[in-house]
Amino acid sequence: MRTIQFREAICEAMSEEMRRDESVYLMGEEVAEYNGAYKASKGMLDEFGADRVIDTPIAELGFGGIGVGSTMTGLRPIIEYMTFNFSLVGIDQIINNAAKIRQMSGGQFPCPIVFRGPTGSAGQLGATHSQAFENWFANTPGLKVVVPSNPYDAKGLLKAAIRDNDPVIFMESEQMYGDKGEVPDGEYVLPIGVADIKREGKDVTIVSFGKIIKEAYKAADQLAEEGISCEIIDLRTVRPLDKEAIFESVRKTNRLVILEEAWPFGNVSTEITYQVQAHCFDHLDAPIQRINTADTPAPYSPVLLKEWLPNSDDVVNAVRKVMYK
């Protein structure tokens, strides 16, 4: 198996699907001439031409609406946002059109569209460019929300998203595009809605997704030296949520810590906490611990940003708490 970057896995997934299906096209800011803001579409303009790899103005509402409308003519667009912070300008097209077309048309119009781009903090980008919106979109019936954490998952899940007949929000990270991982040479597609146990353990379950899961790995290594065995579940998909994978793990470990890069009020970890207490209450030996960002806009100062973001020390402390250590 070869080792490639996250951005290369994204590019391969899009290119393979465009070769397979002529109805698939890519549209967004700087996706063509510039090879993508993060070089995730490098070489695609040369291969597929300007009719299928389309540069847009800085007009998210406009090109998002074009994408949604094009699904009604039989096309399968991939809409790239330079960051999901910019999706707020075009969110009406996602929430009020893409997510609702199938129902409002009585099933006559599926909406096979992928909205993709980076989410969450990417360093010193300030309060308006460092927000995580996974829970916003996951709150909307009709949308699927995918948040991969590594190149292998990214490629397999993006191919599945492009083939899906419903709208998919596919969220990446500017800080992961250079990450390297093993990816098969051959064809593979990963199912949407299936979590993955990245590390097996017996003492505590840690649930996370996206780039912040790296902090869980660091914490698990440290805790192993203390004799604490952590099971790490990567959700990969926020909606649909693989609740059974979480339940099965909690019934084994009897303890749960949830790590999420998002504000603490009404987020994904809140939903997981509810589902586990509703279905696994008698298996819990300690209250569930959630780890989130501070409940403030993201700071610009690197010193404050370090305090704002969850880290491996936070995970270690939460695990010790549920272990009563």
Image (spheres, helix red, strand yellow):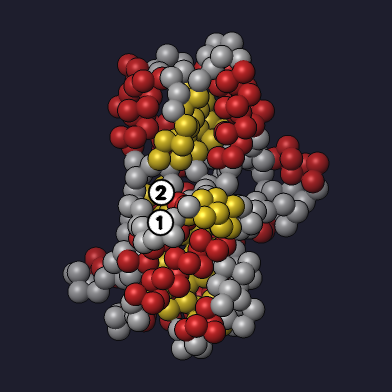
Left or right: 202 in relation to 280: right
Left or right: 6 in relation to 306: left
Q: Of 159 and 88, which appears nearest the observer?
A: 159
Q: Furthest-top residue in view?
A: 325
Q: CA distance from mark 1 to mark 2?
A: 9 Å
Residue 216 picture location, percent across and down: 57, 33
Give the total of numbered labels: 2
Tell which circle, 1 or 2, labels the residue nearer the N-terminal end.
Answer: 1
- Residue type, numbered disc 2: Thr
Residue 189 picture location, percent across and down: 35, 57
Above or below 142: residue 22: below
What residue is at 58 percent from the left and 17 percent from the top?
Answer: 320
Above or below 253: residue 82: below
Q: Of 10 and 269, which appears nearest the observer?
A: 10
Above or below 35: residue 167: above
Left or right: 16 in relation to 309: left
Q: Quadrant of the C terminus?
A: top right
Mark linked to residue 157: 1
Determine the secondary structure under disc 1: helix
Task: Mark yes or no: residue 322 visible.
Answer: yes
Residue labelled with disc 2? 237
Residue 181 picture location, percent across and down: 55, 50
Badge 1: few (under 14), some or many (20 or more) residues near its Cα, within 10 Å? Answer: many
Above or below 301: residue 6: below
Residue 69 picture location, percent across and down: 37, 80
What residue is at 67 percent from the left and 28 percent from the top?
Answer: 313
Based on the displayed image, in which of its 4 quarters is residue 31 positioned?
A: bottom right
Mark linked to residue 284: none
Query: Dots 1 and 2: beta carbons under 8 Å?
Result: yes
